[in-house]
């Protein structure tokens, strides 16, 4: 199954992705994670991406599209894949359609995780990530048993640089102007499924599991 996770920053895409990969056994392709890995490794791509990410802006389409086209050629996508945080613009969505049609593939379902804007700032500024295993927690909504320490692997938890309130506000503006139009794009293609992302993590996962059964 080929899945897209759509939704504003902080909607819970990454959190739900960790459950979906278990269920569907597909690779989780997060463009944000790929950029952060490149930043950590100090690659040319990382340096370029960081200059946009630090400002809360989207990385240019041509850079992201090339990255995803290459990633979709990996062997592990043969039995399906899950895109998280891509596409984020109409240009990216159209480029994806074209790239998939060349390899006789298509998107089966777009899970649009909907959360009201007023909840998002709280979700993002409270997000904590494990330096070691990458697990995502939340200071208030999904707190670790011991402050600052990952429950899964005892790694140190940190806050993403772009999760500070000032940058978050810019990211939400980018979402509304550039990414939100994709909801209609995929609705018209008949693959959109709306998920109520405002409920607890487990309830949202349950709704997604039901949607993926159909
Ligand atoms: P995204 O990948 O869409 O940016 P995340 O999955 O990283 O979002 O979630 C953002 C933050 O909100 C994280 O700290 C996560 O633990 C928390 N979170 C995710 N889903 C929920 C939920 N349903 N209720 C409350 N908090 C949530
Ligand atoms: P995320 O981890 O999905 O929250 O993404 C973090 C940041 O990476 C975004 O704010 C963008 O700067 C950049 N980014 C991730 N995916 C994309 C994309 N598809 N298009 C443009 N920029 C992206």
Image (tube, grey):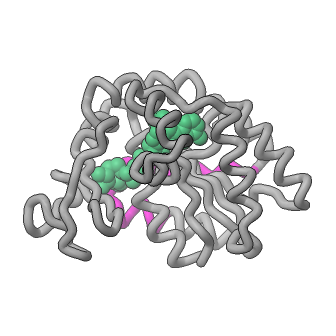
Relative height, residue 11 to residue 17 (above, below): above
Which one is in front, 78 or 169? Answer: 78
Residue 74 location, quadrant: bottom right
User: Is residue 201 shown in magenta?
Assistant: yes
Judged left or right of residue 201, residue 37 is right
Q: Position of residue 124 (x, y in %)?
A: 30, 41
Image quarter in which the C terminus is found? bottom right
Q: How many marks?
A: 0
Residue visible at 81% across and 46% down?
97
Residue visible at 54% across and 77% down?
23
Extreme-left residue of the structure: 146
Relative height, residue 156 to residue 44 (above, below): below
Judged left or right of residue 54, residue 63 is right
Which one is in front, 178 or 162? Answer: 162
Residue visible at 90% across and 61% down?
104
Q: Position of residue 192 (x, y in %)?
A: 67, 48
Q: Position of residue 59 (x, y in %)?
A: 56, 32
Instruction: Give the extent of the magenta segment.
Output: 191-207
Residue visible at 70% across and 34% down?
62
Q: Position of residue 165 (x, y in %)?
A: 26, 29
User: Is residue 85 shown in magenta?
Assistant: no
Whether residue 57 can be seen here: yes
Which one is in front, 34 or 150? Answer: 34
Image quarter in which the N terminus is found? bottom right
Whether residue 8 can be seen here: no
């Amino acid at each position: 199954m080929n899945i897209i996770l759509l939704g504003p920053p902080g909607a819970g895409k990454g959190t739900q992705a960790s459950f979906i990969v278990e269920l569907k056994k597909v690779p989780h392709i997060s463009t944000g994670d790929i950029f952060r890995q490149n930043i950590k490794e100090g690659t040319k791509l990382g340096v370029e991406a960081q200059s946009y990410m630090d400002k809360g802006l989207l990385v240019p389409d041509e850079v992201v599209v090339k990255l995803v086209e290459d990633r979709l050629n990996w062997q592990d996508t043969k039995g399906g894949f899950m895109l998280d945080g891509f596409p984020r613009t109409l240009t990216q969505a159209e480029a994806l359609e074209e790239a998939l049609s060349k390899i006789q593939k298509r998107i089966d379902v777009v899970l649009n995780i909907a959360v009201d804007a007023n909840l998002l700032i709280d979700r993002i500024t409270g997000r904590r990530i494990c330096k070691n295993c990458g697990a995502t927690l939340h200071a208030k909504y999904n707190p670790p048993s011991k402050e600052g320490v990952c429950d899964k692997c005892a790694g140190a938890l940190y806050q993403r640089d772009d999760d500070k309130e000032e940058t978050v506000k810019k990211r939400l503006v980018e979402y509304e102007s550039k990414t939100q139009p994709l909801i209609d794009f995929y609705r018209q293609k008949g693959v959109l499924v709306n998920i109520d992302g405002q409920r607890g993590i487990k309830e949202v996962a349950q709704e997604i599991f039901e949607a993926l059964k159909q």
